[in-house]
Image (spheres, grey):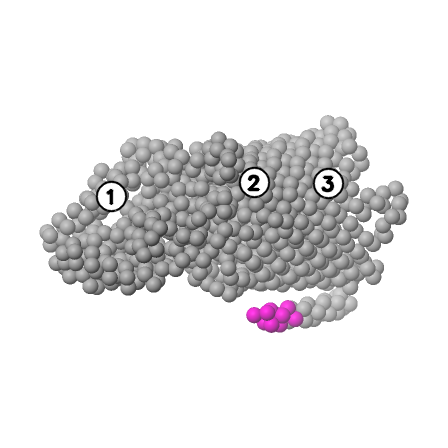
Amino acid sequence: MIPSLLTSVRAGLLAMTVFSTLAAQAQRTIPADTTRKKVDLEEVVVSASKVEESFLQSPVTVEKLNARALRLTPAPSFFDAIEHLKGVQVITPSLAFKVINARGFTNTTNVRFAQLVDGVDNQAPHIGAPIGNVLGPSDLDVLSVEIVPGTAAALYGLNAINGLANFRTKNPFNFEGLSVQQKTGLNHLGDPNSGARLFSETSLRYAKVLRPKLAFKVNGTYLRGYDWIANDQTDINPNGNANTNLLGADNPARDPVNGYGNESSDRSTLNLGGKNYQVARTGYNEKDVVDYHLKILKADAALHYKLSAGTELAYTYRVAAFNNVYQRSNRFQLQGYRLQQHALQLTSPVVQARVYFTQENTGQSYNLRSAAENIDRGFKPDATWNRDYTSAWNAATQAGQAVAQAHATARAAADTGRPQPGTPAFGQSLSNVQNINNWDVGAALRVRANLLHAEGQVNIAEALRRGGKTWLPANVDLLAGADHRTYLVVPDGNYFVNPEPGKDQLRDNLTYGKTGGFLQAGTRLLNEKIRLTATLRADKNDYFTTRFNPRFTAVYSPSQQANFRLSYQSGYRFPSLFEGFSNVNSGQVKRIGGLRVMSNGVFENSYLRTSIDAFVAANTAYINANTPANATATQKQAINNQAINLNKRLLVKNPYTYLKPEHINSLELGYKAALLPGRRLLVDVDFYYNTYRDFIAQVEAYVPKTLNPDSTAIYLSTRTTQNRYRLWTNAQSQVYNYGGSLGLRYELARGYLAGANTTYTRLDRTESGDGLEDGFNTPRWAYNLSLGNENAYKNLGFGLNYRWQQGYYSQTFLVSGNVAAYHTLDAQLSYAVPAPNLRIKLGASNILNDYYASYLGGPSVGGLYYLSVTYGLQ
């Protein structure tokens, strides 16, 4: 694999050399067209090295959306436009909740990718990741977007192991005045699950310079719409009764992807007519237990004060209240969810410091799966339902019904009186479980969590050179920084408890913290044609010893227009709150954190669920093949014992253990150049190779309710005699992934801008099928094409974006399987009215309205058609 990768790298570098030579020849032979605009490449970025540097000379891959790109995009918002950047993948759990990732291992709660606003992390603390852009800026306040695909842990630590996004907002000193934007649109056209629905988003921004040193800004956004619907009826347990030839609609253990209450923990093995059958509770579809009306109300206010030239102090307050659908291990109705954040930042050429405090309250949110299964169990307990089912099945077969028909009759009989969606009884049952904070009998999500973060960095080189001092050579850069973060969770008794010895599980708040720092040194050689940087970071977590992350980068610039880059870095990711401390009774499977303080004794005494499933299936097949129709109870028990003794060899002891930090080594090569006359062509190519150690994933393992090893197989053959767990742990195998991307951006005549990029991402593991859920969830190939012009004809502009991505294997906590390839076309027409400074945009995402799912278990996404009117946008 490594030789083939090196071959690819050599081929890529050869191609770049040829490309550069041809471009240089073209510059000598093609006269410059002074009527064309130059591609704006003089911009700077800050996210790659934590200091301002040239976009072209960044030592690692960095993607940027500037003001022009944001005006050209046909995406409904700046956040949606990120999907079209090179090397970036976005999945859609909800219309108002999208997840950004790069370079693999994405999921609906991406704790490996950081999302910042002006350097401030805007995650929901207990989740460990942001909920889309609900606590982020509006389109009116975004100045630019910077994406760093690939690990940034050496500089940022925390959860930036796969990269980060930094949204830079407009400073009120530089962007003053009133801006208003109204978007009105439609979605769900041609959707068999819903008629057409209205979408509306109203945003306002006002900024004012009160005095030469004092300015403020306020922003507000109110979004309303109808969410995308998840109604995949594919059976994810199609072979549950294959040995009795009950398939498809006849399968009594049918488990639709977006049906809840009929999962594995809601199934029983019933002996009917001498054969064993898997039978699931009936459950409800997602659309029965969720309100798809979404609403987001968010606002922020900032006060900026200039202490001196180049030095500014700013206080920002952000708040969001929202209802939408969110997905983690299960899908959730977020209802009355509230996030607040206070941030104080100091910026100067020498010192940058920030401290922020984030508060999270999940409001009246609830788990859709738990709601469905506990409505069923509240109507009739499993034991009673199974007894009624068995009685009705026996009566039906005695009356001459075929086996499949008897199962349908038995289900109808057992479900008699069951609350039906849309009825007052069902509404009351749903309301009841929403407010019970115990997922064994209810569905409420009642979490209050806080995050306190402080960080600072000093540009030592700049400080030493102040006032004309020469204590440090002009070609040497020196930067140092430190940070501390503490999570504080109020135990709710269901999602989190305080597990520390001597602490009250429900009364004492749970705290979880980390302290870290970095030192970065760099030099510029050969008239700044070579730039070398070395970084060393150290992090100490409450539950782990100090970990060190080095980073080394080199940039070679044979000319100002051409830059080759090389970087090597490592990174650690400490377990998130949920991975370390979760304590959830979820559908009779307890989800517990992987830290020893949470799961002591479970790893040593458990068996892999995958092996137990194989063991039970083999038992069922043996019993069904060897039990006579008229067998007595004694004969049945003897055959059951024979099956257990014969198949117990299939059981596999859980080989995994308590959580350790996840580690990555990453090597990256890249080339970025501005070519052709006027530097109208931007070329950016990168290759990377990552090695993961102690990759954090989940395993499902069950503990028999016995201490006698001779009885283990007997106890694991029956659901009621085992304790079921889903555990966070580390992969024992090495995990590798590698890939690359190529981006082209070309400035044509008269302001036309064309772009194309493609991304290749590949997972390679030394082991597979080991019971872990790694969730790579990334297409091998994806590409984007774009064309736009802000002023194609008399203030009339347009933008087009086309995206295609290959099908891939999706593995989430909810369901696993293959996601089909899909493509989308986004388009917009815009018209600018210079006075009174209006911009009108008519656009659509997925204009062809080809419904697709970006991952299994998620919603079906169609076209969103909108009209946007903006006043005062600068």
Mark 3 vs mark 2, CA separation in Å: 25 Å
Name the amino acid type tagged 3. Answer: Gln
Q: Position of residue 854 (x, y in %)?
A: 47, 53
Provide the residue designation for mark 2.
512
Which residue has dot 3 on it? 352
- The span picked out in magenta is 1-10
Residue 383 tag number: 1
Q: Earlier in the sequence, mark 1 or mark 2?
A: 1
Q: Are marks 1 and 3 in contact (CB under 8 Å)?
A: no
* Secondary structure state at the residue bearing disc 3: strand
Badge 1 amino acid? Ala
Residue 703 location (% of width, % of height): 37, 51
- Residue 60 horizontal/vertical position (percent): 68, 56
**Quarter of the image where one finds residue 684:** bottom right
Quadrant into which the C terminus falls: top right
Q: Is residue 507 visible?
A: yes
Establish if 713 lies above or below 585: below
Q: Amino acid at mark 2?
A: Tyr
How many C-alpha atoms fall within 10 Å of the one at disc 1: few (<14), some, or many (≥20)?
few
